Image (cartoon, grey):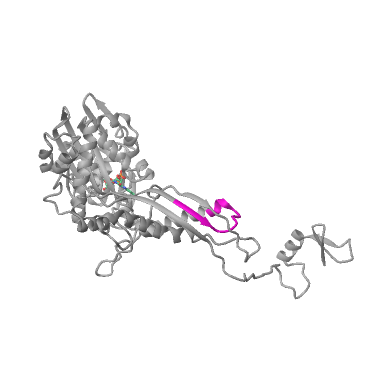
């Protein structure tokens, strides 16, 4: 067989050929195949890159903490990620947006709470907080492009870039805001009451 | 998440609703926007055998301003209140509450009558209607009763509405110097704390104040001590307003849940009351 002019043909016989679509349809229908030949036409190739890829990036978050309530407001969020060549920039941005939201949700909101009898108290989305659109900041995104040499496309992963960057960026921003109160650590999620209590315990002037 | 079996009937008038309530007794529930009742039924916290749909009753969904008096029909939707310029002018506190209640889907279905009749301690309107000293018109077999907000709201999920009665209207005097500020629960967006302030001013000083709190007690409540402490305070004097608003929740057994303890809620009641007072004074 040979591939010529967009068709699959019998070598040396220019009269015998069909398009790949025709061949695929015949293989799929399977009712006109030589005896013993299974229907279907697929092939699997596996590519083992010679090394890992190393996407990297930097996320910066600016927050304001209301000393009277412990409520946190996002002022700015900037993320610069390097996932190599961007084949579809819109999908890359979407991945980063979703990842940042998920990561900041871990830092600020999400918590599974059980009572002393093992009863789940946060069993519905009326109790278990996942941020709505208005509870997350605007994201300023940018990219550097450092193509990897370990695959022919120069691409690196981006799926986890948002979550990996945002949880510590958000948590560290909040802890930085609380530094003047002498607070150095609070377990996530950084719920307002915890921040308020920590500010009060360390420093009466929060009131 | 699937309710128990129930029947459904549409009432054509208030009298028809009262007749149907009498016919079906304790098994029946009025259905307005369904945004409190249906979730309760899906969780099987309520299992009425008969739903009497009152949303088709005409003329119960109007916002009327007659001189200084504002009257709101029980079937008026949150979205209509939130979009009303007349309400924004005459009672900005209620307008604030409507704009911050739930999400667009909830605002497009839920009604002020249902939200009041439900008696949810985390709901927004009860605090505002207490601060407005609103009058509730309730109609039953024996005729019409008028109840003041202080008598209407009783305890968690309990109001002065009788079993066979329909709430038809809520009325109050215009209160242009009023505001409602809300601490949103991050998941439900109900009030962790909601503070309503209705003021009259003399120059820049507060002449009279009515203050009510949602989210903290078993029902919304008036903060009488704070109301008297506010008299004579300049609305723009942040420190003096804050001092007058200390102890808003005193005498209340502040509720606690997975998001906020009672002590934190009580402290936030002071903070949000001071903000509501400052905002009302600046209007
Ligand atoms: C996702 C979600 C978020 C929400 N967030 C908030 C919030 O942030 N703040 C807030 O305050 N509320 C919130 N709500 C509740 C919302 O305000 C409801 O619309 C309201 O509590 C009930 O009004 P309804 O018209 O839907 O009444 P329904 O659910 O139909 O009825 C509620 C109760 O009132 C009775 N009833 C209704 N109308 C009358 C009447 N005219 N006379 C006598 N009894 C009557 C019914 O029999 C029933 O017992 C939320 C609801 C949902 C689902």
In the rendered image, residue A106, in percent from the top left (x then y), is placed at 38, 60
Residue B179 falls left or right of residue A176? left
Say whether residue B197 is visible: yes
Q: Quadrant of the N terminus of chain B?
A: bottom left
Quick one: B118 or B21, which is closer to the camera? B118
A150 lies above or below A72: below
Number of labels in the image equals 0
Q: What is the quadrant of residue A114 in the picture?
A: bottom left
In the rendered image, residue B172, in percent from the top left (x then y), is placed at 20, 32
Quick one: A53 or B230, which is closer to the camera? A53
| Residue A84 magenta-highlighted | yes
B235 lies above or below B35: above
Residue B243 falls left or right of residue B24? left
Residue B105 falls left or right of residue B94? right
In the rendered image, residue B242, in percent from the top left (x then y), is placed at 17, 42
Instruction: Find the magenta span and give its range.
Output: A78-92
Q: Quadrant of the C terminus of chain B?
A: top left
Quick one: B272 or A9, which is closer to the camera? B272
In the rendered image, residue B91, in percent from the top left (x then y), is placed at 25, 32
């Amino acid at each position: 067989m040979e591939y010529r002019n967009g068709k699959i043909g019998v070598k040396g016989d220019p009269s015998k050929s069909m398009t790949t679509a025709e061949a695929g349809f015949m293989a799929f229908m399977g009712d006109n195949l030589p005896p013993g030949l299974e229907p279907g036409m697929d092939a699997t190739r596996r590519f083992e890159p010679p090394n890992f890829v190393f996407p990297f990036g930097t996320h910066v978050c600016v927050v304001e903490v209301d000393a009277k309530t412990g409520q946190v407001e996002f002022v700015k969020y900037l993320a610069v990620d390097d996932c190599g060549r961007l084949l579809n920039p819109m999908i890359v941005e979407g991945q980063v947006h979703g990842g940042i939201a998920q990561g900041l949700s871990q830092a600020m909101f999400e918590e599974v709470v059980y009572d002393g009898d093992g009863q789940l108290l946060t069993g519905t989305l009326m109790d278990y907080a996942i941020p709505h659109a208005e509870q997350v900041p605007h994201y300023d995104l940018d990219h550097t492009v450092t193509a990897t040499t370990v695959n022919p496309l120069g691409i690196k992963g981006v799926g986890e870039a948002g979550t990996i960057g945002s949880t510590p960026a958000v948590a560290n921003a909040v802890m930085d805001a609380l530094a003047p109160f002498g607070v150095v650590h609070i377990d996530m999620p950084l719920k307002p009451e915890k921040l308020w209590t920590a500010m009060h315990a360390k420093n009466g002037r929060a009131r | 998440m699937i309710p128990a079996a129930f029947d459904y009937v549409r009432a054509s008038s208030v009298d028809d609703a009262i007749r149907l309530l009498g016919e079906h007794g304790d098994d029946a529930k009025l259905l307005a926007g369904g945004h409190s009742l249906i979730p309760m039924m899906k969780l099987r916290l309520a299992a009425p055998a008969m739903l009497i749909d009152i949303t088709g009753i005409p003329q119960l969904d109007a916002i009327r301003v007659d001189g200084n008096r504002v009257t709101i029909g029980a079937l008026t939707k949150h979205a209509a209140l939130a979009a009303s310029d007349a309400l924004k002018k005459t009672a900005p506190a209620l307008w604030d509450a409507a704009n911050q209640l739930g999400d667009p889907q909830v605002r497009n279905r839920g009604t002020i009558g249902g939200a009041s009749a439900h008696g949810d301690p985390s709901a927004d309107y009860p605090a505002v209607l207490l601060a407005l000293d609103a009058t509730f018109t309730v109609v039953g077999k024996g005729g019409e009763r008028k109840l003041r907000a202080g008598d209407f709201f009783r305890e968690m999920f309990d109001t002065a509405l009788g079993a066979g009665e329909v709430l038809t209207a809520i009325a109050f005097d215009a209160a242009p110097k009023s505001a409602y500020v809300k601490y949103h629960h991050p998941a439900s967006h109900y009030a962790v704390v909601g503070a309503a302030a209705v003021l009259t001013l003399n120059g820049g000083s507060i002449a009279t104040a009515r203050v009510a709190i949602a989210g903290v007690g078993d029902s919304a409540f008036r903060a009488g001590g704070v109301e008297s402490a506010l008299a004579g305070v300049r609305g723009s004097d942040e420190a003096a307003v804050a001092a007058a608003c200390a102890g808003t929740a005193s005498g209340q057994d502040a509720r606690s849940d997975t998001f906020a303890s009672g002590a934190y809620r009580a402290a936030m009641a002071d903070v949000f009351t001071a903000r509501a007072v400052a905002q009302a004074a600046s209007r």
